[in-house]
Image (spheres, grey):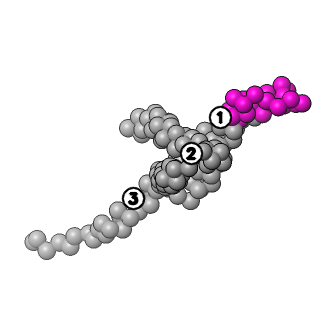
Amino acid sequence: MFNQSKPSLNVHALIRDMLEDERELLILLGQDFLTAHLEDVETRLHRWQNYFENHYARDTPPRGDADKLRVYQIEYALITQLATESQTEPFPVVHQRALQQARQRMRLLVNKRDFTNASLKSTRFEAHLEQEFLVDLWSKWHTWLKPRRLQNR
């Protein structure tokens, strides 16, 4: 009477499949997010480069303008690197690893305590910018995800 066989359910395989699906979804979402963000950064960089070419073709640009162009170049390089790494790994993993590396690089530069060396000063500035971009990017990622979460409910 009660000797019916129960269907076997491999819970571990089910969980593994769900995690793999989630990982693939995160990879695709990360690629979409970074592609959209890379287009924005690319547009700003190209606009600024065109401005540079039109206004300072023969003259050296003011320091502030040259610094702004360098900031856009740093942001573009960072986003490009993240987009490349996010082809095979989920964006949150890639982002957190990049943030840890940027913080470690900043710690090493600050621990050198050589604040008079001009090359270290620009390197510290770039490392600081990288950290700021990564923190800002994380905030933009969550803002970008919000409407997509609501659609799935």
Which of the pair 86/118 is nearer the observer? 118
- Judge whether residue 60 is colored magenta: yes
- The secondary element bearing badge 1 is classed as helix
Residue 64 marker = none
- The structure residue drawn at horizontal position 40% and vertical position 59%, both measured from the top left corner, is 19
- The structure residue drawn at horizontal position 22% and vertical position 70%, both measured from the top left corner, is 6
Three-letter code, disc 3: Met
Q: Is residue 51 above or below residue 22?
A: above
Q: State the residue position of label 3.
A: 18
| Disc nearer the start of the sequence (1/2) | 1
Q: Is residue 50 above or below residue 20?
A: above
Q: Distance between the residues labelled 2 and 3?
A: 51 Å
Q: Distance between the residues labelled 1 and 3?
A: 33 Å
- How many numbered badges does the structure rendering display? 3
Q: Can you tell which of label 1 and label 2 is closer to the viewer?
A: 2
- The secondary element bearing badge 3 is classed as helix
Which of the pair 141/23 is nearer the observer? 141
Residue at the farthest top position: 55
**Quadrant in the picture for the C terminus:** top left
Percent x, y of residue 123: 61, 47
Three-letter code, disc 1: Asp
